[in-house]
């Protein structure tokens, strides 16, 4: 009898807690930037099916770029790259960031304070995981790249926190 009562009490607490969390997440003020869809460089678009992408991307790249996954912190070979060069989208080779805007954020992901051009990326509100963030995608192929936060350094105050597996690097 006591076990049944305890099980019911715990179940009720879980339901009430989840409902309160969901309501809070829905009512929480958003700090995400508005949707920012741009015309990609040269009007270029790359559209591939999931099957086509699975042929050209590694499983880790596919997970991040198509399924909006996140690589483990400190796992990217691009994290410590500081040579002069350009970081591009691994899916379509669209130039995204220069090393001149890269900085050490201490988060475990490659971080930049500005994209190479305003039309290199798109941003959109992302309400997953019970929080509101701003997702960053490639403007050419719509691949998920990471998120942007407003805790970066001058001159922009932004931190583009990117999944290294979603990018390639080419020295200049």
Image (cartoon, rainbow, N blue to C red):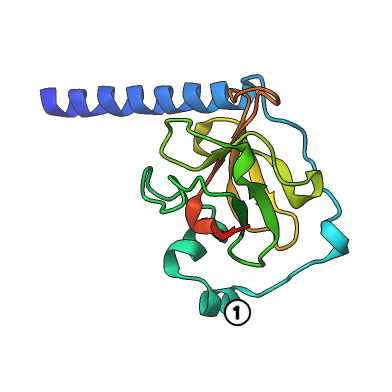
Where in the figure is residue 80, as x and y percent of width and height? 43, 45
Q: Residue at x 63, y 38 (%)?
A: 101
| Quarter of the figure that contains the C terminus | bottom right
Task: Name the quadrant containing residue 48.
Answer: bottom right
Graded by Cα atoms within 10 Å as few (under 14), some (14 to 19) or many (20 or more), the crowding at tag 1 reads few
Where does the N terminus fall, quadrant-wise? top left
47 vs 170, nearest the viewer: 170
* Left or right: residue 137 compared with residue 103: right
161 and 88: which one is in front?
Answer: 88
Of 110 and 73, nearer the camera is: 110
Mark 1 lies on a secondary structure that is: helix
Of residues 13 and 135, the one nearer the viewer is 135
**Position of residue 122 measured from the top left corner of the image (x, y, whole percent):** 74, 47
- Res. 133 in view: no
Disc 1 target residue: 52
Give me the residue at 55% from left, 21% from top. Answer: 24
Residue 101 located left or right of residue 21: right
* Residue 162 shows in the view: yes
Disc tally is 1
Q: Is residue 64 left or right of residue 152?
A: left
Instruction: Determine which quarter of the picture holds residue 155.
Output: top right
Residue found 59% across the figure and 25% down from its top: 152
Tell me the residue at 40%/28% (across/down). 15
Location of residue 46 with respect to 15 vertically, above or below: below
Does 4 appear above or below 89? Answer: above
Could you tell whether 67 is left or right of 12 in the image?
A: right
């Amino acid at each position: 009898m006591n076990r049944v009562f305890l099980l019911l009490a715990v179940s009720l607490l879980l339901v009430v807690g989840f409902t309160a969390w969901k309501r809070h997440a829905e009512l929480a003020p958003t700090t995400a930037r508005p949707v920012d869809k741009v015309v990609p460089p040269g009007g270029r678009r790359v559209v591939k099916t999931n099957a086509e992408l699975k042929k050209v991307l590694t499983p880790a790249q596919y997970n991040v770029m198509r399924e909006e996954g996140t690589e483990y912190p400190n796992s990217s070979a691009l994290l410590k790259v500081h040579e002069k060069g350009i970081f591009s989208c691994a899916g379509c080779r669209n130039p995204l960031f220069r090393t001149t805007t890269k900085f050490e954020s201490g988060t475990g992901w490659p971080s930049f304070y500005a994209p190479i051009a305003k039309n290199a990326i798109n941003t959109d509100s992302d309400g997953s995981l019970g929080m509101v963030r701003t997702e960053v995608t490639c403007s050419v192929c719509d691949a998920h790249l990471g998120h942007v936060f407003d805790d970066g350094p001058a001159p922009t105050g932004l931190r583009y926190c990117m999944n290294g597996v979603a990018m390639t690097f080419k020295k200049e």
